[in-house]
Structure formats: C-alpha cells, structure tokens
Image (tube, helix red, strand yellow):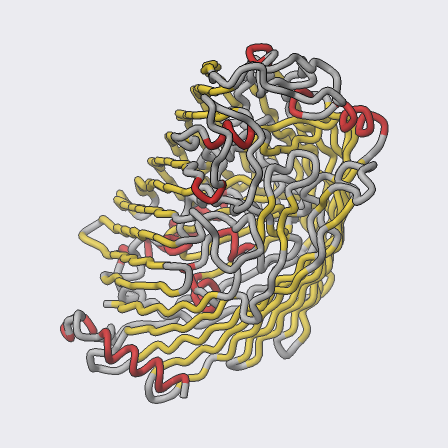
Amino acid sequence: MIRRMLLATAAAIIVPFSPATAQADPSSQPAPAGTAAPGASVPAAPSTTAPAKAGSDIVITGRRLDVARDAITPSLGASQYTFNKEALEKQPGGTNLTLNKSLLQAPGVVQDSYGVIHVRNEHANLQYRLNGVIVPESISGFGTTFDPRIASSIQLITGTLPAQYGYRTAGIINFRTDSGIQGNGGEVGMYGGTFGRIEPNAMIRGTSGNLTFFGSASYLRNDIGIENPMPTRNAVHDRTTQFRPFAYVTDILSDTSRISVFGGSFIGDFQIPNVTGQAPAFTVNGVSNFNSAKLDQNQREITHYGVAAYQYAGDSFNLQLAPFVRYTETRFSPDPKHGDIIFNGFADAARLTGLAAGVQADGSQKLGSNHVLRFGLFFQNEHTTSRVASTVLPANDCAGDENCVIAQTSDVPLTIVDTHQKTGQLYGAYLQDEWKLTSNLTLNYGARFDVVRAYTRESQLSPRANLVWEATPLTTFHVGYARTFTPPPQELVAPSDINLFNATTKQALIRTGGPVKAEREHYFDAGVEQRVKGGLKLAIDAYYKKKQNLLDEGQFGSALILSPFNYAKGYAWGVELSANYTHGPLDLYANLARGEEKAKNIISSQYFFAPSELAYIQNHYIFTDHSQKWSASGGATYTIHDGLGTLVPTADFVYGSGLRTDDPNGIVPNGGALPGYWVVNAGIAQTFKGSGVLNGLTVRLDVLNLFDKVYQIRSGAGVGVGAPQWGQRRGIFVGVTKRF
C-alpha cells in the first residue's frame, strides 16, 4: 500500500520534468560505500548517483588527487565515524535533515538546544573543514552553516587527534564536498510537511574540458525554527527562513596538480519563540501590561566563506596550500514596543561581526618504506566588532547583595551603548612522523605549536602520539595521548563594560571579571575494533581528559548569543560502544555511550553569575551543564531491488538520559538532571529506474518523532542556561527528488 502511495505521488508531480532528462547513463556504476574507523557504525549503502564514464582521464586524475589530498592529513589513531552519501540519503529525513541531527547517530554525540551538539560531553569546541581546509566558525546561533547535500561524505573525528588538528579538538567535522567528477547531471527536489515546512533544493554538477564544477542551493521555511520553549505541539512566533548556496570549481592543471575554488553562504532569519502567560515585572512610560505571546524578537545570522586551494600530488611529495576568508554577522532585534523591558527590565539590540582571513598549508613526504613525514602551517587574522545598545530603566544599586531586590526608580527608559572591536591572530605549525615499526604496528607521533594573540595572549607546544596495532586482519587496537590547546572563540568574546549598567535594571551583582583564557588539556584514549566474518563489527573506546581553564559557554542576555567563560579545573571521562551489521540488503547499527564532565572554580566573566553560585563552585566540582550520563543511537535499513527500482524502508532512534539542571533542593548548581527520552524516526523511499519519465525519480515519506514523544531538552535552570526548550513533536514529511 505504501509503495502504491509513493507511485501515485510520483505520477502526480512528474509533469514538470522533461522525459529527455530521464535517460540513464549506461556506464553508471555504484560508488564506493562509506567506511568507518574505530568507533564507527554507519551502514554502507549502494550508490544512487551516476559517476562519469570510467575511461575519462579527468575523472581518473580527479579521483587520484582526491585520494592524495586525504592522505596528507589522515586521522591515524583517532576514532573516525564516516557518513557516506548513501548513508545520509537513507536515514529518515535523508539529506533534508540538518547536520546536527545526522551527527546524533554517531557514538558519544549529545543533543542540545539551538542546534548545538556536544561531542564527548564538551561544549562546542568543534572544528569544521571542507576538503581538509579549516573554515573558521561563525558566530553561534540557531542555524547550521553547511548543508549536508554538498557532501559526498562527512567525517566526525574524535579522540587523541594527530598533530595536524588544532584549536577546536573535541571533534573534527570534515566535509568531502561533491566536485563534479561524478559526471554531468544534477537534481531538483522539494521537501515539506508538518510545521509549515517547505524546502526546495537543486544541484548541478559536471565537467568541461579540464574543469569540474558543482553547485547547490536550498531554501527552508518552517514554523519551528528554534526549539519550542513550551511543551505544546506548535510554538508561538517561531518562523524561520534559511538559504544555503554553495559552489565548487576545479581546474586540473596536470596529472599531478589542480586549483580548486569553493565557497558558500548561510543566511537565516529567526523569530524568537514566546512563552505565553508571563507576568510583567516592570513599567515603561506608564505601561505595565503586555501580552507575552505578542513579543516580537528576531535574530538574523549571516555567514559567507570562500577557499582557494592549490594541490600538488607527486610520487612521494604532496602539498595543499589554501588561503581562506570568512565573514559572519549576527543581529538581534528586541521587541519594538518595549516588551523586553516590561518583562526583563532591559532590551538589547545587538550586532556582532567577524571578518577572518588566513592561509593553511599541509604537506607530506615519504621517507623510505617505513616513514611518512607530515608538516604544516596555519595563520589567521580576524577582526571582530560588537555593538550592544541596551535600553534599561533606572534602579536602586544592589552591588554584591544577592538578597537585594532590583526595583526601578523611574519608568522612563534610557539607552546605553557598549561597543568593542578587536583584531587578533592565530599562528600554528606542526610536524609529525608516521613510522611503520612492523608490518602491523604503526606509531604516529609529533607535535604542534600554537599562538593566540587576541583578547588573550598565550601559546603552547602540544605533543601527540598514537599507536595502532593490527593484531589480526580482523582485530585492531589503538592507544593515544594528545596535549591540546583551545583558544577562546574571538567572535564571541565581546567583553562588556559592566559598570555602565550600575544602578539600572541590567546591573550585575558582581562588578568584575577575569579575562577568558585558552583551555589546556591532557587527553588519553584507547580502543579496540573487532570485525567478525559475516558482516558484524564491534568497537569499544574509552577516554579520559584532564583540563586547565576549561572553556564553557552560556546564554546570559536577551540576545540568543553564547558567551564563553572558564573554570579553573575540569575533567571528563567516557566509554563508547558501537556495533554494526551488514548482510545483503540489511544494515543495522547501534551505539551506546556513558560519560561525564565536571569542573570547579569559575575564573573569568564572573559578572555573569550570582555570588552564591560562584562561592559554591569555587570549592566544589560540579557537572557542566552539557554533561549527560548516557546517550544511545541506532538504526536499520532494508534495501529491496525489483522491477520498479529500489525501495528502502528505514528507521532510527536517539536516547538521552537528560542534560543537567539545578538541584531540586537549590543547593548544588547543575546538581539535577532532566528526565530521559527516546525519539524514534521512520521513513521509506522509492527510487524509480527504467527508460521512462520516472527514471531517476525518488519519492520519500518520513515520520520524525514517530510516537510523538514530549520531552524537554533544557529546563531554563543551570549554570549558563538561558531558557527552556522542548524537542520537536511528531512531524510527517514528503519529499520528491528528480535526478537528471
């Protein structure tokens, strides 16, 4: 019955597509399935994209250069989890899911609000790379900059990272982008359904002479842009529109070199959802009544990025040189009718910008049969600005007195403008050797040196070492150590002149704060992967991290922008188990993780916190707000080939034991935990084949949160936690994609 429904849907929408575009390439062959290193468990899947003809010189050269590029910066000894294109398309929701939702299917990844994920219980600290090149992070908000549709595969690399990885070290998310060497063609699609979701998208790829090209664009509109702050099915005032274009062009200069230019944008507009029934707390110009459902707060997020990369791949020497640029901007607009002031006592109109430019160079040189030397340099210059115009009310002064009640002394608002700008730099260099001690034992050792010159001026030499032992063809052990150095994100460090707000309704009880510092860490990791004949793979990985100046982030104002701060000390530990099984048309996988992170003594940005919080945390380890004891994920797909084409029913799930909240007794910050939850998703997709107009057409039906689970992600209580959020309720979505 479901297949008949999909076929009927296909027939209804096929009219706009020309039969001339539906001819199959007789030379099409399935693309290689995705792979995963220790800790991975995404099932492999057959390709649905037709590559260029195998005899094409440009295709052969392009693929060889891709392999050489990836070999410059391998993840030897780290835990690597790879989503290939087919795995992304097979999950419920397919590539229409945002990146953070897909990554929840990796072990040790925890869901949070505002699209944030935590890898191994760390807050943020993720580095994004496109084809191995770092793209500086944007000012954090609600949108995800990168569209999964642009990827031929996505890697999540965790653990004790080799020396080429620096600055953001909780996890590396590397996109291998589509490049056009798969052949001339493209696709157009439409996806939509519940919560007013409409998402048209299109891609084009191809070759012309020595050039290959790829372009992608998607537009999203829905009515649940940010997590609902209430447990209702539909949020109030929560519409979003998001646009993500991307383009990639490569000129293959010779059999050993090429120049690639690629870049993209994210432009997102978000309404800030409202909580109904709130009681006004202040009076503005004689007005003290306001319907909280009518608040009109909005946020706009903009990111543009571009990379130009030259690659040379010789017999023993490989090099990639890549200058890059990124501009990011976030603007928060408060309610124009002073609603923010009536409820909160202040309204912030905030604009943050960051312009970063730099260059990354990575190279490798084979030295005989047992050594590969790898080396690299990194430089980034960034100019950031911050302007916050705060409309506040005059009030009594409660400096240092937590028992003092802030009371307005006038209902006539005044505006205070706080502006800052900073130009800062990051410098880095690394050198490492991959030494094959024996035929089945490899030591990857080296070090990197990093310098930050911005709001903090620090440096560190960081040794790294990983040992990998292939005990048998089916059993692999790895153990590693990494010293890491994580500078605070300059685009978020906008120090406030806190004394500007003394004797106002935005005053801080603590009037001083230390500077935000770089986090320093000792990281230990060990694991084993066991493959069993018949398609089963099992893996276990354990880690321990000891931290100095542990970096965390929190939401402390009306603008939904995170601000960093440091704990003096911290530690984290965890164990991850994963399994996957592939046999014929059946793919199964499951992950389970147990972990925690604790810290003590807040030593920077103390003005964000209450005196009692600071006093307790100074002498006690507490859970960080993003620490979750248990997380799990899993899924299954079954591929059916018949006369119509390919039918793929699929399902997956996510389990979380609950993020932290305050102690119910009000004693221990982050001393409580939210209830656990299970979320199950399901979908089915039919891809048609043949010589008719249906050839290359895929129709899918997805049900996300199948059992309509009502679950809370954040309670609004805890250290650095700004507002409550609830998970998305059940949604039913239909998608149609036409490949040509």
- Can you give x and y, in whole percent of width and height, for residue 326 in the image? 38, 31
Q: Say if 701 sits above or below 152 in the image.
A: below
The quadrant in which the C terminus is found is bottom left
Query: What's the residue at 62%, 46% (across, down)?
Result: 118
Can see residue 569?
yes
Q: Say if 64 sits above or below 362 in the image.
A: below
- The mark tally for this picture is 0
Query: What's the residue at 32%, 41% (across, down)?
Result: 262
Left or right placement of residue 684 versus residue 691 in this view: right
Can see residue 32?
no
- Can you give x and y, in whole percent of width and height, for residue 499 in the image? 60, 10
Closer-to-camera residue (730/439): 730
- Can you give x and y, in whole percent of width and height, for residue 101 in the image? 52, 56
The quadrant in which the N terminus is found is bottom left
- Can you give x and y, in whole percent of width and height, for residue 105 in the image? 58, 60
Q: Which residue is farthest front?
A: 286
